[in-house]
Image (cartoon, helix red, strand yellow):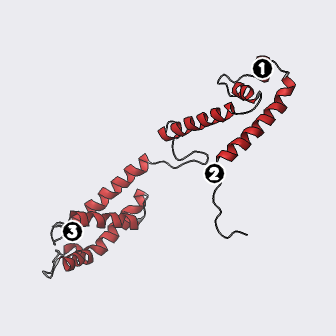
Amino acid sequence: MTLLDHVLRVPADGPEDGGRAVVDALHALVRAEAGAEAQAAGVEAADLEQAVWLRLLERRTGSDGPVDPARWVRSAVRAEVRAARRRARRERSYTGGESPGDWAGCPERLILGAAERRALRTAVGRLPGRCPRLLEAMLAPHDPTYREIAGELGMSQGSLGPMRSRCLGCLRRMLAAEVVAPELRGKER
């Protein structure tokens, strides 16, 4: 007589003992079925076995096991294999340069970007001299050339680079003063 020929006999001591009896009776069968099906499904046998045990625990309402344990284990293992294959078809791995999510249309990213642009425009407006006009021209959405910016501001094209550099340095200092410095961690010396 084999394990498949046995009918589960659950002692009447209590549900904890009955659960142990079911596990003891089905352990070898679940392990064998999961091991046989796992390779073809592309999953690990231990993961498949765990899914079958979970399915058994979710199914049990009383202290008795399935009526036909061998048939139930085979169908449960095959159902989990089908679910694993469906997951494998739907899932795809990330390639090297790909980000884990599409952040382009993310509402949070859009709101943060708009807030950053507003803060930048506000800071540019507080710069001294001709810096606000120069940086506003450089931040224009139609992306003007140096020649167009120089013509718009009435200055030579050669002086745009050094002036842009001074204005950006001033903007960096202004924004650095507004950002709170992180607290020191650890020991201070």
**Res 24 → quadrant:** bottom left
Q: Is residue 9 left or right of residue 164?
A: left
- Which residue is found at the position 42% from the left and 47% from the top? 89
Q: Nearer the viewer, residue 143 or 9?
A: 143
Closer to the camera: disc 3 or disc 1? 1
Q: Tag on residue 69?
A: 3
Q: Nearer the viewer, residue 157 or 179?
A: 179
Q: Is residue 151 left or right of residue 125?
A: right
Are the residues tagged 3 and 1 within 8 Å (C-beta)? no
Q: Nearer the viewer, residue 49 or 159?
A: 159
In the structure shown, which secondary structural element does the residue marked by tag 2 occupy?
loop
- Which residue is found at the position 63% from the left and 51% from the top? 180
Quarter of the picture containing the C terminus is bottom right
Q: Nearer the viewer, residue 98 or 143?
A: 143
User: Mark 2 or 1 closer to N-term?
Assistant: 1
Q: Tag on residue 180?
A: 2
One can see residue 1 in this view? no
Quote the CA–CA distance across marks 3 and 1.
86 Å
In the structure shown, which secondary structural element does the residue marked by tag 1 occupy?
helix
Amino acid at circle 1: Leu
Amino acid at circle 3: Pro
Q: Residue 11 at what x, y percent from top left?
A: 15, 81
Quote the CA–CA distance across marks 2 and 1.
35 Å
Outermost residue to the left = 12
The relative height of residue 13 versus residue 104 in the rendered view (above or below) is below
Q: Tag on residue 153?
A: 1
- Which residue is found at the position 37% from the left and 65% from the top? 36
